Amino acid sequence: MLTDLYQISDFNREAGHVSARIGLNISHPIFEGHFPGQPVLPGVCQMAIVKDLLEKALQKPLRLKKADQVKFLSMIDPRKTPELNLQIQLSEDAGLYTAQAVLQFEEYTFLKYKARFVDA
């Protein structure tokens, strides 16, 4: 689903923190159906991007165990916001990964997401 939807232009992982800058591919087919003439990045894709970047940071596949909080604060129109910044606070306890993610660009926050993941 996310093949070619975005590219990572900057990726950093430090203890307890993951950050990335991503560029959206405005010509991706998902924007043709969601929604024709007025493209919006689907919320499920935003959540999947968080999971993808966690897997990249941890270098292993993950499975969502529980989404504690999911707040979509504003729509992402890829024509107006082709780049996004993702910040993830990450902790691990006995194979349970807790992530608090914020997807934003400049002063706009689009997603606040707290979730728990386990090894897939």
Image: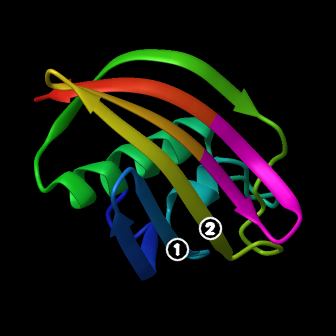
Query: SS of the residue at dot 2?
Result: strand
Task: Kindly report the secondary structure that dominates the magenta region of the rendered protein.
Answer: strand
Which amino acid, by three-letter code, is at mark 1?
A: Ile
Q: Compared to 104, does 73 lie above or below?
A: above
Residue at the image position 48 percent from the left and 70 percent from the top:
20
Quarter containing the C terminus: top left
Which amino acid, by three-letter code, is at mark 2?
A: Asn
Q: Say how the picture is coloured.
A: rainbow
Location of mark 1 (residue): 22
Q: Quadrant of residue 53?
A: bottom left
Location of mark 2 (residue): 85
- Which residue range is magenta in the image? 102-112
Considering depth in this image, is 44 or 51 the residue closer to the camera? 51
Residue at the image position 69 percent from the left and 76 percent from the top:
82
CB atoms of marks 1 and 2 within 8 Å: yes
* Left or right of 67 on screen, residue 95: left
Q: Quadrant of residue 98?
A: top left
Considering depth in this image, is 85 or 35 the residue closer to the camera? 85
